[in-house]
Image: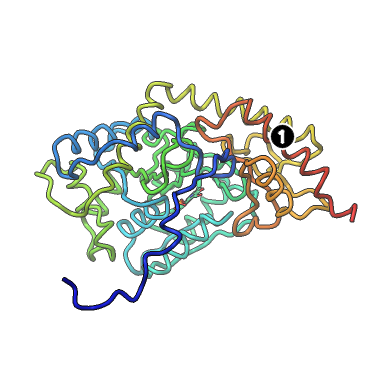
Amino acid sequence: MATRQLLVAPPEALLRPLFIPNRLLLGPGPSNLAPRVLVAGGQQMIGHMHKEMFQIMDDIKQGIQYVFQTKNPLTLAISGSGHCALEAALFNILEPGDPFLVGVNGIWGQRAADIGERIGARVHPMIKDPGNHYTLQELEEALAQHKPVLLFLTQGESSSGVLQPLDGYGELCHRYNCLLLVDSVASLCGTPIYMDQQGIDVLYSGSQKVLNSPPGTSLISFSDKAKNRIYTRKTKPVSFYLDMKWLANIWGCDGKPRIYHHTTPVVSLYSLRESLALIAEQGLENSWRQHREVTAYLHGRLQGLGLQLFVKDPALRLPTVTAVAVPAGYDWRDIVNYVMDHFDIEITGGLGPSMGKVLRIGLLGCNATRENVDRVIRALQEALQRCSRNKL
Ligand SMILES: Cc1ncc(COP(=O)(O)O)c(C=O)c1O
């Protein structure tokens, strides 16, 4: 028997049943889980080192190679959200003092620059107002000036709704001996990306957007050039948890017997495998088409309400997350709260540099349907009638 008295009582809150409201998540992510993903995540645990688990991990690797369109052997899932994949990329590629060029046209570039500074890299941010993208010419000038070892770009800038073109960017970087790192957290499976053909050296994405999986795992792949850099580093990466040589081993990428590194999130990996299976069944091109068509329908309906899309050039609008300029005479919070309180639908305001400027609506994976567009438009229409500050 214990000899001491408990000073902290069981919390009242935990003695009440868990309550989860039924919400339609039409923000920039996370999205609702696909029904089959929900079922997969309800299965019993097995050990993280069991052979069946290694088979699931191997299936996931192949799924990532498919959605990234890569044959890179160093392809795996990270036990952590999108930020963790970004850290895995930067911790493993950069060493202190390395010049690092970062496209900062929204919050994700800001985060990449921040992590680069923590590593002690010489960070060169290319700052642009949210809503803009980077041209090949601009990048060529910056590559020539700073001679970076790595360039960071965000394909789907979810804080501003911009789709960064990628054709030609890898080739350009390689001419300047620079590796190309791309964030596709908000765009993967919603718009084309061809890792090998576009010469992308490091690509990462998240589980909770178009893949309709729970947050907490992410996808990453390294080209042979990037892998070579990792294996010839002079210093160890600052993170043991994200050391790619260890992760390559537990993910069966180095041809050696797998040894324990950390306990992988077994159940989350069931969900991730099921998400990738759903995309494999649907086909990438069908998924891209679905997002393009349903988001074009959303854009038409938003303009029908008199709203302005934040990204002016239609070719640069992301087919997953749409940024709408906050209409004059409204506070974005009133609109977001109205839609949540009266319709149980999540849409969000801006983030980082786009905060206060935009509302964001995401159509991600199984949420990308015309029915959901009609629902959110009805909610917005009513919110616009009720929330105008000009009437006060
Ligand atoms: C483009 C982009 N990159 C990175 C992230 C960060 O991912 P996470 O929140 O899973 O860490 C997000 C999340 O919204 C994102 O949209």
Q: Position of residue 197 (x, y in %)?
A: 39, 33
Q: Position of residue 171 (x, y in %)?
A: 42, 41
Q: Is mark 1 within 8 Å of ligand 1?
A: no
Residue furthest left in the image: 257
Above or below, comparing residue 101 to residue 160 in the picture: below
Residue kind at label 1, given as amino acid type = Ile
Where residue 195 sits, quadrant-wise, is top left
Q: Please give left or right for residue 290 compared with residue 308 in the image.
A: left
Q: Please give left or right for residue 198 compared with residue 155 in the image.
A: left
At horizontal 20% and vertical 40% (from top left) the residue drawn is 46
Q: Looking at the image, which is closer to me, 311 or 299?
A: 299
Q: Secondary structure at mark 1?
A: helix
At horizontal 31% and vertical 44% (from top left) the residue drawn is 77
Q: Looking at the image, which is closer to me, 110 or 94?
A: 110
Q: Position of residue 268 (x, y in %)?
A: 33, 42
At horizontal 42% and vertical 60% (from top left) the residue drawn is 100
Above or below, comparing residue 50 to residue 391 in the picture: above
Q: Position of residue 35 (x, y in %)?
A: 43, 30
Q: Looking at the image, which is closer to me, 392 or 145?
A: 392
Q: Please give left or right for residue 382 compared with residue 356 in the image.
A: right
Q: Quadrant of the N terminus?
A: bottom left
Above or below, comparing residue 320 to residue 106 in the picture: above
Q: Quadrant of the C terminus?
A: bottom right
Count residues near mark 1 (Cα–Cα under 10 Å), then give few for <14, some for 14-19, many for 20+: some
Above or below, comparing residue 85 to residue 286 in the picture: below
Residue furthest right in the image: 391
Residue identifier under label 1: 377
Q: Please give left or right for residue 251 compared with residue 6 in the image.
A: left
